[in-house]
Each structure stands twice: as C-alpha cells, then as structure tokens.
Image (cartoon, grey):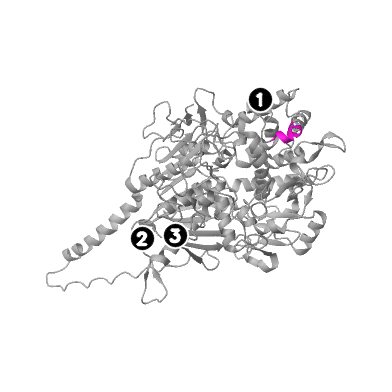
Amino acid sequence: MKSPRRFNRTLIQHALLIAAPILLGACSSDNDPAPEPPPPPAPVVNVLPAFVTGTVAQASYDGSSDDLLTAGLGKTGLAGAAPAFAVPATPTVAELRRNAIYNNYRALIDYTVVGGFTRLYGPNIDINGGDTLGEGKVAGTEHITVVDDGTGRQNVVLMVQVPNSFDVKNPCIVTATSSGSRGVYGAIGTAGEWGLKHGCAVAYTDKGSGNGLHDLSSDKVIQIDGTIDTATVAGKKAHFNAGLSEAERLAYIAAFPNRVAYKHAHSQQNPEKDWGRDTLRAVKLAFYVLNEKYGTDIPAQPGKKEVVITPAKTIVIASSVSNGGGAALAAAEQDTEGLIDGVAVTEPMAQPGANTGLTIKQGSAAAVATHSKPLIDYFSYANIYQPCASASAQAGPQINLAPMAANVQNRCSALKARGLLAGTTLAEQADEALAKLNAYGWQSESNFLHQSHFRYATNSIVVNYVNSYGKFKPSDNVCGYSYANTNVTVGPNLGDVIAQSATVQAGLFSTGNGVPPTGGINIVYNDSVGGAKWDFLALSAGSGAPGVGLADFALDGALCMRSLVTGKDAVSGAGLFGTQKSWSDRVIAGMGEVQLTAKLRAVPTIIVAGRSDTLIPVNHAARAYYGKNQVLEAATSKTRYYEVTNAQHFDTFIAVPAWGYDSRLVPLHVYFGRAMDQMWAHLKNSTALPASQVVHTTPRAAGVNVTLANVPVWAPTPAASDAIGFAAGVLSIPD
C-alpha cells in the first residue's frame, strides 16, 4: 500500500476528473452544444537525470552462466574458495566483477553452514524461508553510471539491477547503498539480495567512497570498471586521483616512498555529507532505468519513452546496513519529493547530533552517562583505551591481540605514565581502561569484542575519518600517518614499508574494502622511532626512554588524532595552536557537516541493532537516533526500534571459530531480512508495525548449527518486560 499522502492525492485527482463534466453541464444551457472533449494529456517523457555525468552502461545476465546476485557462482561458489583469475596480472572486467561480488557478499554475513548460510538465509532461500531456489542465481539487467561535478574528483558510482521477475504492474525499488567504504557491490548480500528475490529493482551507490586507490609511486589508479592504469590514461575514468600536482607527487614519494592514497580518506570531498543525496539519486536513476526498459514508445518523438512507472505507483524502501543504513536514514530525512515510502535498516551508522533532550536508561541501572557522540569522537576515544582494555579479565581470553601481548602491556604503562590511567599493575590498568570504555557508552556486552575491533577496525576508522572530515591530502601525513604495504616477514624488517605488488594491485577492485588495512595495505606511522613502521609495531617517541621509544601501538599518533577531534590536547586538556589548531578546526567542521536530524516526518521506519555492537555502539547510534526521533516527533513518529541481544556488527567474525564469537553471538543478518519483510508487509498490506522491543536470543554451543530457536522473531505485541518505552524525554530499554 502506498503512503496515505500519495493515495489521497490520487483520489482527489480522480474525483475532479469525474466531477468536471457534471459541473460544466450544470452551468450550461440545454441549447448549448456539448463541450469539446479535452485533448489527451501530453506524454511525460522519460529523461536521463541531469546529475548523470555520461551514459548509462547496460549488461544482461542470463541467470545461469552469470547473474545479478552471485556473478554466476551460485550458493555453492559463494560458500567456496575465492575464484582465481585466469591471468592474475591482468584480470578481466568480468572476473573483477565476479570476485567483487564474491568478497562483498561474504564480508557482511556469517558464510558458514553452521552459522545459518544456505539454511536460514542465502541465495537458495526463498522469500518464505524455504530452500527452493537451488543455486539462487538471478537473471536480469545491470545498469551502471557515474555522477560527478565535472572534475572527476567525485565519481560517485550508481547502479541499478532489474531482475527479470520485475512486475511492471506492481513496481518496487529497494536501495542498497554500500556499507563501510565499499564499492558499489557493497550491499549485494543484504539489501541487494532481498530486493532481487522480491522482484524489485535495486538501486545501489558506492556513495562517493568506493574502492578508489591511487598508488603514488607508480601513479597507477583503479578505474571505474576495476582495471588498473596510469592516472594520465585513466583521466576522469579513475575512481579516484589524489589531486596532487606532478611536482607535489614526486616530492612526496621522494620523502615517503611507496605510499598510496585512498578515496574515502583523501578525496577532499568529505563524501559522508552527501550519502543521503547519493541514495536519493540512485532511486531517481532506478526510475529512469525502469521507464527506459518498460515505458511505451512515443511515436512523435522517436527513441523517447513515456514514463509509466512513477513514485506514486511504486513501493520504495530505503535500506542497507552500517554506513549504508545511515545513508538510508539520511535519504529519508532529505526526501522532499516523496520518493521513499519506508525505511528498514540494521546497525546503522547514524549520527544524531546534539541530543541533550534525551536520557537513556536500561533496566534499573542509572541513566547512560555518555551517549549520542559523533562517530569520530567515540572512535578516537576507543583508539586510546581499547588495546589496554583487552588485557582485562573481564574482556575474556586474549585472542586477536595475543601475538602482541607485550605491546598491549606497553600501551597500558604508557597511558599510566601520561596520567591517563591511575592503576599500578597491568590488571588494574586494564580494568580501568575497560571501565572508561563502558562509561563512555559501550555496553558491558561489548567487553569481549574490544580486542578484535582494535585489531581490525578502530585505528582504521580513526585515520580514515579524520582525513576525510578535515579534507586532507595524503601528503599532509596527518598526525604522522600514511598508507602503504608493509613487510610481513618475521625479523628486524617486519612492518617496514615496501612497494605494492603489481599482481595484488591488479585485483584490488575485487578484494579491497575501500579503507586500509585492505589488500596488504596497512596504516603506517611515519614518526616511529627508527623509521616508518606499520602502526601496530611502531615506537612512540613520547613513551619509553628518550630516543628509544616504546612499542605501544603508536600512542603518540592516537593522542594526536584525539586532540584534532576534541580541539584540546588529549593529555593536558589545553587548547591547541598553530597547525594542530587549524587542522582540528577543519576536522570539527567536517564532523558538523555529517550530523543527522532524526526528523523522519512520519515515514515508516524500522531500525534494528545488536546490543553487543562494539563498532557502532547503540548508545551513540541506534538508541540515540531513535530516542532523538521520539523527542522531536513522538506524536507523529512511525519509527520502530528492535534491539537484539547477543548480536553485533560483524557477522563475518562469527565465521572464524578460533575467535570465540560463534558460542557468544547470533547472526544479526537474520533480523535484517525480517525487518525488510515487516516493512514490505506494512507498505503492501497495511500490516501494523510491532511496537519497539528488545528481542532476547539464545547463543548456541560452538560448532552447533544456529536454528530458529536461537533467533526468535520479535513479538507482534511485546510483553511488558520486553517493550521499549519513551516518555518525558526518557528512552527506557529493558534488560
């Protein structure tokens, strides 16, 4: 069912058409001639949106040898080893697309059978939950274009997939904005799969981040089609060019050899501020593509199509996960044209901005002390304390950081030496660091996950977003950081900067996630004592003996980054000055550009988050955004929030048994599908949205299959003990 505002508008138009001849007859004489019938309305011509830079490329997939969802791999291929390139040094465009789909699909889910893949979800599972779709290949057409301001610096990639099952009489569109900093296939396994299975067109965008590498030493770039060429040859076909003059580039690599730049970090565009706009543009492109495909020919205008699929007749669901989920919410906030009918997202990276009117309470505990912080604020805080906190007994056994246990201890002692911790023993310092994280908004359920997140995510996000928000060039080396491949051979040169591998680089479009560490590229701390080093092995000059330093995960750099985010020295609290002050001003301005409003204007919205989310803590994102929406629009809001216990951000981490996630956590992806199903039923059949609630799950034993008993459905009417409440500015979350 369409939104009431569009339905009412249609009724009024029909009523006027019926009433017009009656009113005309009442005002005319019996002797007057009958009025001439009005001429038929002129056809509405389908026009390529003005924001599209060039042409829209189209490819057809037969659903057998190749397809939209699995690139011809099917469920079996997606579950197996990554397919090889015929010639690794020069993979074809088709091979790069295939492997990009393979890697992006697996990156967002637990891809193991015991975790639920091919049993509870996957290409073979139909819209009713049955295993009836075989390999799950989807035939249809794929349409890709680029949006830019004419400089080649933006090059936002938009893509529309139209399955052959699309029903022109019952049109629907689902957005699938990429998660993280991934390329245009970044949401293929979440919103993409759901939309294709339901016969909907899927509107994708890489939202201006994408997998854009510029190797500054060789001057090679990744092009829009995934292939590698020189920046000169690629021109505006490059995903990203660092924008350095030739003199700047040569001077930089002379001082810092073998460095690379990445689009999200170094495009100097702060692309996040436009994620909502990009998502709306993907929807508009989908309408254009659909009308080119299904519109009727206009005889008087050869080659032109009449618009037959309109927003008023089409169900449009804005969806995706993580950053893509935040983009869907931003799009709904910015949708002044009534394109979006509903929103369904999980674990959204939503920054609600100032939220002083909200109090968050869980169970009988005191109000949450710290909530609604900007992304880079809580990440730069975690970047200081997470490695030390991982040594706490409350965080469980050391797994991910065990090989660097000495560095963990060094970080704790270095924080103590700078007055940022008070404990005297390692145990006391680790417990204190963990307590600081809990006080800053992380749930205690996240304690075990801090070590893996510091190892694989936290420092990456900090370097990426500080550079992005401040619109820095790679040559700025902000806080002493850069990107490069590093030596993996154990010995004295471990962690040293090395050159890119041409063969690895050739496949980065399909293997990279858009933000280092990725594809062998790591974060390098240029200011490490003794020379540039992988930041995890770097020695801070401000720690340890003078001139010797201490291997403390580059604490000097982490503190510098924190200072730029807060505008104050991270140790002394004093104001900044000089270059650091001007850089901080730029970062803070960029942070301001991306804050959301939480004003959804009664658009039906479902937000799902895992209580144990350590990457995007619920108190800073899902709870905070939902709470602000209630503060501002409680009387008219149609937003629902479902919080799932024993669930977190990275389902793919559950697929690694050695990490211990499998016996602690359930796959949140199951609830993504349910959120989409719920929104579909609401928009199509007016099925009521269940009230906001906590869903209590049951983890399984290690090595045992996840079953539906582990992941119960939310209740149509939650029990009082599970119901999430809001009154007088207080968001109440049950234990």
| Residue count near mark 2 (Cα–Cα under 10 Å), binned few <14, some 14–19, many ≥20 | some
- Residue 691 image point, x, y percent: 39, 35
Asked if the residues shown at circle 3 and circle 2 are in contact, with their CB atoms under 8 angstroms apart, the answer is no
- Residue 114 is tagged as none
Q: For the residues carrying marks 2 and 1, which lies nearer the camera in this image? A: 1
Disc 3/disc 2 C-alpha distance (Å)? 16 Å
Front residue of 47/702: it is: 702
- Residue 581 image point, x, y percent: 73, 44
- Write down the residue under mark 3: 139
Disc 2, SS: loop
Residue positioned most to the right: 547
Disc 1/disc 3 C-alpha distance (Å)? 52 Å
**Residue beneath the point at 82% across and 54% down:** 255
The verdict on residue 208 being magenta is no
Q: For the residues carrying marks 3 and 2, which lies nearer the camera in this image? A: 3
- Viewed as shown, does residue 272 lie left or right of 291? right
Q: Is residue 648 above or below residue 193?
A: above
Disc 1, SS: helix
Q: How many numbered marks does the figure carry?
A: 3
- Residue 67 image point, x, y percent: 48, 59
The stretch of residues the image draws in magenta is: 401-408
Asked if the residues shown at circle 2 and circle 1 are in contact, with their CB atoms under 8 angstroms apart, the answer is no
- Write down the residue under mark 2: 168
- Write down the residue under mark 1: 393
- Viewed as shown, does residue 11 lie left or right of 256? left
Q: Amino acid at mark 3?
A: Ala
Q: Amino acid at mark 2?
A: Val
